Image (cartoon, rainbow, N blue to C red):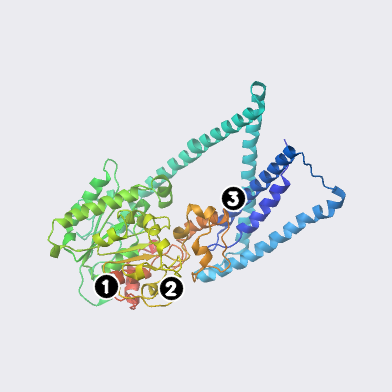
Amino acid sequence: MRFKPDAAGLVGAHVMGWVSLSPSFIPRTWWMTALNTGISQTFGYVVGAAGTAAARAVGRQLGIEIRIDEERARPAIEALPWLMFGISGLSWLRNLRAQTEIAGLMETRPTRSREHMVGVIGGLALTAGLVSAGRGINAIATHLSSALKPVMPAPVAAAVGAGATATGTAFVLDKVVYRRLLEWLSKTAQETNAKLLPGRVPPVEPERSGSAASFEAWSTLGAKGQAVVSDGPRAVDIEEATGRPALTPIRAYAGWREGRDLEETAAAVVAELHRTGGFDREVLLVLTTTGTGWLQEWSASSVEFLTGGNCALASMQYTYLPSGVAFIADRISPVLAASTLLAAIEEELAKRPPERRPKLLVGGESLGALGGTKAFEGLEDMIGRVDGAVWSGMPRFAEFWESLVPFRRRGTPEIAPVIDDGRHVRFATRPEDLVTDFTGVPFGAWDSPRIVVAQHASDPVVWWSPDLMWRKPDWAKEKAGSDISRSLQWQPWVTFWQVASDMPQSVSVPGGHGHRYVEDMLQYWAAVLGQDPLTDYSTIAQAIRRTIVPNFA
C-alpha cells in the first residue's frame, strides 16, 4: 500500500525541524543534529496528524464539514512547499551561526557546514523511519480491530485492537530491544573492565592497592581501578611542584568482583587503609566513583598536592557499567556503595580518639555526586559528619541539590545560588564564585566544614531533567551563564532531547565548560582545606597534568 503522508503532519514536522536546530549547550556533531531533528520532526508529525484526525472526528460529531475551493487555494498550496523550504534554509543558516557562537564560548572548533548538513539529512532519514514504524504499528491495530468487529461492537473492537497492539509493541521493545541492548552493553562493559588501559602498570609503592604488598590483586581492580592506583603523584612529584618535603599519597581501592557484596568490598577498602596506615594520615578522602569505577583524577590529585601527600584516598567500584547505562539500569548501586563505604570508614574512625582521627573529606562527580550526597540525610547531616566536600557535575534532580537550590537567596540565579549567605555550602561555576556571589558582592565568613558544589552553566549533565519536557526551568529564563548562547530558548519536548544529546559530547569540550571539571578542582579543594582559592596554583596544575595519562587528562 502506498504511503500518503498527512499534510498537517508534514507541516508539524517542518516546524519542529526548525525548532530542533535551535542552539543548546554544546557544539553539535552530525549525530547530535540527526537525533534532535529526527525525534523533533517525528513529534511534530504526530501532533499535526493527530490534530487533524481529532478535528475531523469532532466535525463529524457536530455535523460540520469544511470544504476548500481548490481553484482559489491552488496558488497558496503551490507556494507553501517553497515557503517552507525557504524557512528551512534560513533556519539552517541561522543555526550554523549559533553553532559558531557556541564554539567560541566553548573555546573549541565550530561545526563544519558539511557535518551539519549530514546531520540534517540523517535526521530526515530518522524521521522517515520513525514515522513509517508508527504507521506500521497503527496499521496492525486497524487490521486487528477490523477482524474483531464481526464478534463485538465497533468501539470495543477498536479499543481491544489498540490495546493489544500497544501491549505487543511494549513487549517487543522491552524484551527484544531494551533487554537485548542492556545485555549487549553489559557484556561489552564487562569485557572493557577486564582490559588494561594504555600506559597503566601495577604500582610498586606499598601505599597503593594493586601493588605486591596489597591485599587487592592488580587483576581484580578493573580497568578504571587500575588507572586510579597507577595514576597520580608520588612524593617526588609533589616535592618538585611545591618545594617542600612530601609523603607518597595512599590510594586504597577495591574492585567489583563476582560473589563479593558491597559490605565485603567496603571492608576490603578499610583493610587496605589499615595496611597502608591511611587512618594515620592528616586527611582521609572518600570519593564515590561513577559507573565503571572511574574517579575524577583532578579531584584526587588536587588534595594530594595541597596536603603535601599527607592524605589517603579511599574508593571502590560497584559496577562495570558506563555511567549512562548504570543511571538507567541501576541507580541504587552508587547510593548503596557510597553509604556502605562511608559507614565502614566512620565505624573505624569512631574507634580512635578524636585527636588521632584524620580530617574526613568526601566528594564525587556526576553519578558519583548523585550517589555520594545520598549517603547523607541532608546538608545538616553532611555538616555534622564530615570536614569538607566537593561535589562536581551533580545532576539537578539529586535530592541534595533539590533540597537547597529552590530555597536560594532571592535574586541569585539557579546556576550559582546563594544558600544561607554561603555560611557552609557554596555553589560555583568558577573559583571566583567562592569569594563573591554571582553579582560580585563579597561573601561573609565561611565556616567549617566547607562544602563546594561545582556546576558549569553549560553542563548538560547538571541541567538535564525529565521535567524539561514540559516545564521551563529557571536557568533557561535567567540565561546567566557566560558560556551559553543568548539564543538558547527552552521549547517543550525539543529542549529535553537537545540537552540529552549534549551529555555524551559534554566531556569532549575544553576544561571549564560542559562536564569537564579540571584545573578549577585545585581551587575548590584549596577552599575546602582552608586555603585561599584565588591563589595562583598554576605550578601545581602543570604538575598534575604531567602525572595524568593523556587519555584521561
Q: Position of residue 441 (x, y in %)?
A: 40, 77
In this orientation, does residue 412 appear? yes
Residues at marks 3 and 2, CA–CA distance in whole angstroms: 36 Å
Residues at marks 1 and 2, CA–CA distance in whole angstroms: 21 Å
Amino acid type at mark 1: Gly
Mark 3 surroundings: few (<14), some (14-19) or many (≥20) residues within 10 A:
many
The quarter holding residue 452 reads bottom left
Residue 306 as seen in the image, left or right of residue 156: left
In this orientation, does residue 216 appear? no
Q: Which mark is nearer the camera, 3 or 1?
A: 1
Q: Earlier in the sequence, mark 1 or mark 2?
A: 2
**Image point 35% across, 68% down: which residue?**
420
Q: Residue furthest left?
A: 353
Which SS class for mark 2? loop
* Mark number displayed over residue 438: 2
| 39 over 384 or under it: above or below | above
* Mark number displayed over residue 530: 1
Q: Position of residue 424 (x, y in %)?
A: 31, 67
